[in-house]
Image (tube, rainbow, N blue to C red):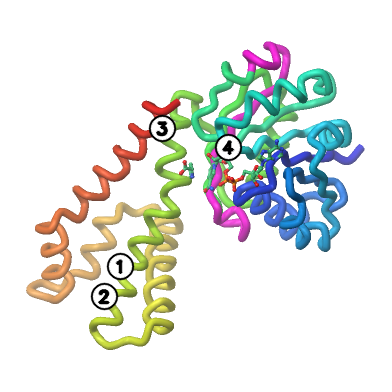
Amino acid sequence: MSKKIAIIGGGNLGTAIAEGLISSRFISPKHIIVTKRNIATLRSLEEKGVLVTSDNEEAVKYADWVILAVKPFQVKDILSKLQPHLNPEKHALVSVITGVWIKDIQEVLGNNFTLFRAMPNTAIAIQQSITCICKHNASVEQEEFVTNLFDQLGKTVMIEEKLMDAATVLGACGTAYAMRYIRANIQGGIEIGFDAQTASLIAAQTVKGAAELLLTRHTHPEQEIDKVTTPKGCTIAGLNEMEHQGFSSSLIKGVVTSYKKIVNDM
Ligand SMILES: NC(=O)C1=CN([C@@H]2O[C@H](COP(=O)(O)OP(=O)(O)OC[C@H]3O[C@@H](n4cnc5c(N)ncnc54)[C@H](O)[C@@H]3O)[C@@H](O)[C@H]2O)C=CC1
Ligand SMILES: O=C(O)[C@@H]1CCC=N1
């Protein structure tokens, strides 16, 4: 029988997952049901054949896989209401919620459920996410299903739950960090003569190419940098100025600050 997936919380990430699953043809749109209190903004998913509802209970009755994609502060209340309608023989859960641990979910649902935590990023909408996954109480088939699902949407890596906060920072917040890097390049590009559109294209494609070099060659960034930096040239002059201004240091401090924010808030 075909698997059916409920996405509880059709916000940025929930809709991005639905869109990615449809584009990858991993699952038929009619086997996805997305919930949100106000479903008006889910119209475009509905037009693609996805079921939408404001009733979480209806969604879990329909599905066997339940993806939780609401804000951290909403999850306990939502799970408490769903608890009478969830059955460990039928349902397996995947939470993409930041800072919510397997033990937090177990506090509401008990210990019998198969639970996964997955940390994708918003590039999941175009099947280019990195998704870090950890599992609890999962069979080999269930692990394969979840890995296969997120493999359709980019790359996946299985990690221990204790690294989930770190995965959130590096993988999910990382999309925003990368955008800021690109934006700064665009601003610099405009100052040295490009119009905004051309600067954006050059900056984004350059970053994409740099990432592809690392992903296909499995080299260290510094090896690739060595190939760009002509002695006494302009690249090393710019790079060194960036470092004098604290470039790497500011990025590392930002990553650690994001991490501390998750750890201290949750
Ligand atoms: N945005 C991102 O890049 C990433 C977000 N996350 C995590 O994913 C979760 C969702 O994040 P976003 O999609 O950005 O937030 P969001 O606020 O866009 O989405 C949450 C959605 O849940 C809906 N919702 C609220 N109460 C509900 C209820 N009772 N029943 C059904 N739906 C309800 C809201 O209307 C909203 O559309 C958060 O826990 C976040 O930490 C994880 C990785 C990346
Ligand atoms: O900023 C946040 O809290 C969430 C977690 C990862 C991406 N967005």
Q: CA distance from mark 3 to mark 1?
A: 26 Å
Label 3 CB-ligand 2 distance < 8 A: yes
Q: Residue 50: give x, y in percent of width and height.
A: 82, 53
Q: Estimate how packed mark 2 is, as few (under 14), some (14 to 19) or many (20 or more) residues with alpha carbons within 10 Å.
A: some
Q: Residue 219: give x, y in percent of width and height.
A: 34, 54
Kindly indicate whether the residue at mark 1 contacts the one at mark 3 (C-beta within 8 angstroms). no
Q: Estimate how packed mark 1 is, as few (under 14), some (14 to 19) or many (20 or more) residues with alpha carbons within 10 Å.
A: few
Residue type, numbered disc 2? Gly
Instruction: Look at mark 1 in the image and give the residue it sits on.
Output: 184
Q: Earlier in the sequence, mark 3 or mark 4?
A: 4
Q: CA distance from mark 3 to mark 4?
A: 13 Å
Label 4 CB-ligand 1 distance < 8 A: yes
Q: In the rendered structure, find residue 71 and report the number of the disc placed on it.
A: 4
Quadrant position of the N terminus in the picture: top right
Magenta segment, which residues? 106-128
Q: Earlier in the sequence, mark 3 or mark 1?
A: 1
Q: Earlier in the sequence, mark 4 or mark 2?
A: 4
Location of residue 227 (image quadrant): bottom left
Q: CA distance from mark 1 to mark 2?
A: 6 Å
Q: Is residue 42 left or right of residue 244?
A: right
Instruction: Look at mark 3 in the image and give the residue it sits on.
Output: 262
